[in-house]
Image (tube, rainbow, N blue to C red):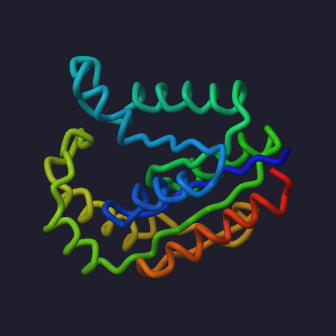
Amino acid sequence: MTRLVIMTVGKTHSGKTTFAKALEKELHNSVVIDQDNHAEFLHAYYQTLLPKQGPNVIKYAITKTIVDYAVNETNCHIIRCNSNRNREGRLNQLAYYHEKGFTSILVNFDIPAHVLEERIAKSDRSKNVLRVASTFEEVLTRQENETNKGDILPPAEGEADHLFVIKNPDDIQSVIGKIVNMAQSVGT
């Protein structure tokens, strides 16, 4: 059986979690692994263990443990729901899945900044997932600056077996349908 790994890529409030949850409902035998859930768990129960600066290594360790379990102990398709904006990190993750025989799919959320700003203004999303910034506006500003300076590059053809780009919410159901059809065509 060929398994899929679907990785979402995008800025805050671009629709990654909404997409992942909708895909999980339609893609049989799949699991969403969302780092925001791990961040909330740590914030609620282990706040004193959170690094004061630098990478959130404990969050990454939790995610890695869950990923390793899903890869090695289940036959689920894996939907990775976090920003995955750093190309080197993304490529390292994809290499791990390719070594395990997965077919990889990147879903890049290329949503205009003004739409993200509107979503943030209306959002009631918990800020418990934030460690360094105090607001999602700060997160978006940092992400915009990283993109503008060229520090963060969007996914390119060839990084994964398949690449989809979502530019507006109307694209979501079409991409979900294509991924579900892909899973069916590879005999899963």
> Considering the image in quadrants, where does the N terminus appear?
top right
Q: Is residue 147 left or right of residue 115?
A: right
- Image coordinates of residue 84 in percent, x first then y, are 50, 53
- Image coordinates of residue 108 in percent, x first then y, are 53, 68
Q: Is residue 13 left or right of residue 135?
A: right
| Vertical order, 57 against 76 (above or below) | above
Q: Is residue 168 left or right of residue 12?
A: right
Choose between 131 and 5: the one closer to the eye.
5
Q: Identify which residue is drawn at 65% across, 49% down.
A: 28
Q: Identify which residue is drawn at 26% across, 19% down.
A: 46
- Image coordinates of residue 115 in percent, x first then y, are 27, 78
Q: Identify which residue is drawn at 58% across, 67% down.
A: 176
Tell me which corner region of the image, top left, top right, bottom left or bottom right, holds residue 113.
bottom left
| Vertical order, 148 against 17 (above or below) | below
Q: Is residue 73 left or right of residue 133?
A: right
| Vertical order, 77 against 163 (above or below) | above
Tell me which corner region of the image, top left, top right, bottom left or bottom right, holds residue 51.
top left
Q: Identify which residue is drawn at 72% across, 43% down.
A: 97
| Vertical order, 62 against 4 (above or below) | above
- Number of labelled discs? 0
- Image coordinates of residue 79 in percent, x first then y, are 57, 49
